[in-house]
Image (cartoon, grey):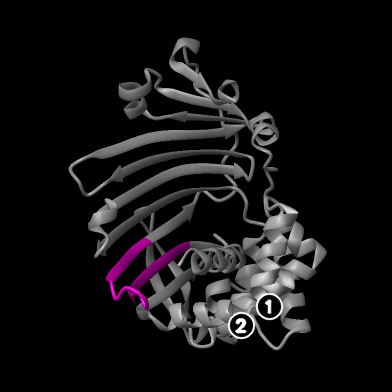
Amino acid sequence: MKKLLSLLLILTLAVGIFVGCGGDKDGVEAAKEMTTQEVFEKVQEVSQEMTNASFLADFDLEMTGLEEMGLAGPMGLTMTGDIKDAENMKITMDIDTGMGMAINGDLYLTDNTILIHAPLLQQFMGYAYLKADLETLAEQAGTPITQPDPDKVKAILDRFEESTEYSIYDIVKLDDAKETVEVVVNEETLDATKLTMNVDLTGADDVIFAFVDFIINDAEAKELFLGSMTDEDIALLQEEMANEESRAELKKALEAITINEFSIAIYANADYQSIKTEFVVDLSFTDPELGDEFSVKLTGFMDYFNIGGVEEIVLPEVDPSEILDMNEMY
């Protein structure tokens, strides 16, 4: 199971970055005359440049069969925030744990400094804030801090498709149909083009093994996706890639997953900017060895607005006595 999750995590990272947040004629109208693939590629092109926006996210999570691990449902997560760019943002989070306890907090990232305000911490640690210099923290932890470049990711995925018989679209499949709809974004009703993608795990073991093998042998992909792994860990991963037993184990685990629904809907405005993303992940899993069953259902959305309007992220003024410096913990 641990091996399966590691491989799926690598692939999910690639898919997540690829899908994004993210003319002469109004884009919504022009999209009616374009193929679904053409609209999708246009949205992807624009989303790579859409690094400045405010957002609202709301997710609900229901789980069964995981109560012994302390995981139960339903749980809820709401996030709002402003992103100036990959290195400057503010996020406010409210979490309903589903067990009668709510957790809330704020995260600030700017000037290479991260500041987390978590009132619950004060009850256990005596501090309401955690603070760290990210470069120093990365050096102390031995893990470099990198921000994936969407252009590099797309180039890597293109090379993967060109050099193998597989594609990311073998798993994440774009529906042929597209719709012109009205959608509510941050309480405002807007015209949009709706694109829908579905995840299909049929043959996913071949794609996953091919993709992991590709990034191990592609210098740029290796640095981007495996940069925090040691040479020893990478060698072990490569050994597993050549192991038929590992392939059979992954295939068996994937076959034990039942996808009731796994869809992603992207709404694009007249400028082909992704203004809303909706997710439905409804999975059931039966452990092939123990026979244990559990299910996970995640539903939610992310709205993007105030695009290009985030000017500055400012750290709040806090009494030093309320701050625990994580750099001093090493």
Q: Residue at x 55, y 39 (%)?
A: 89
Q: Residue at x 32, y 29 (%)?
A: 120
Q: Is residue 277 magenta?
A: yes
**Mark 2 nearby-residue class (10 Å; few <14, some 14–19, many ≥20):** few
Up the image or down, 100 lies above or below 164; here it is above
Residue corresponding to mark 1: 242
Between the residue at mark 1 and the residue at mark 2, the CA separation in whole angstroms equals 6 Å
Q: Foreground residue, 180 or 296?
A: 296
Q: Is residue 98 visible?
A: yes
Range of magenta residues: 276-300
Up the image or down, 91 lies above or below 288; here it is above
Side (left or right) of 87 relative to 183: right
> Mark number for residue 9?
none
Q: Position of residue 247 (x, y in %)?
A: 57, 80
Question: Number of marks in the image?
Answer: 2
Looking at the rendered structure, the secondary structure element under dot 2 is helix
**Mark 1 nearby-residue class (10 Å; few <14, some 14–19, many ≥20):** few
Looking at the rendered structure, the secondary structure element under dot 1 is loop
Q: Position of residue 233 (x, y in %)?
A: 67, 57
Side (left or right) of 99 relative to 260: left
Which residue reaches farthest right?
Answer: 219
Residue corresponding to mark 2: 244
Dividing the picture into quadrants, the one containing residue 103 is top left
Which residue reaches farthest left?
Answer: 100
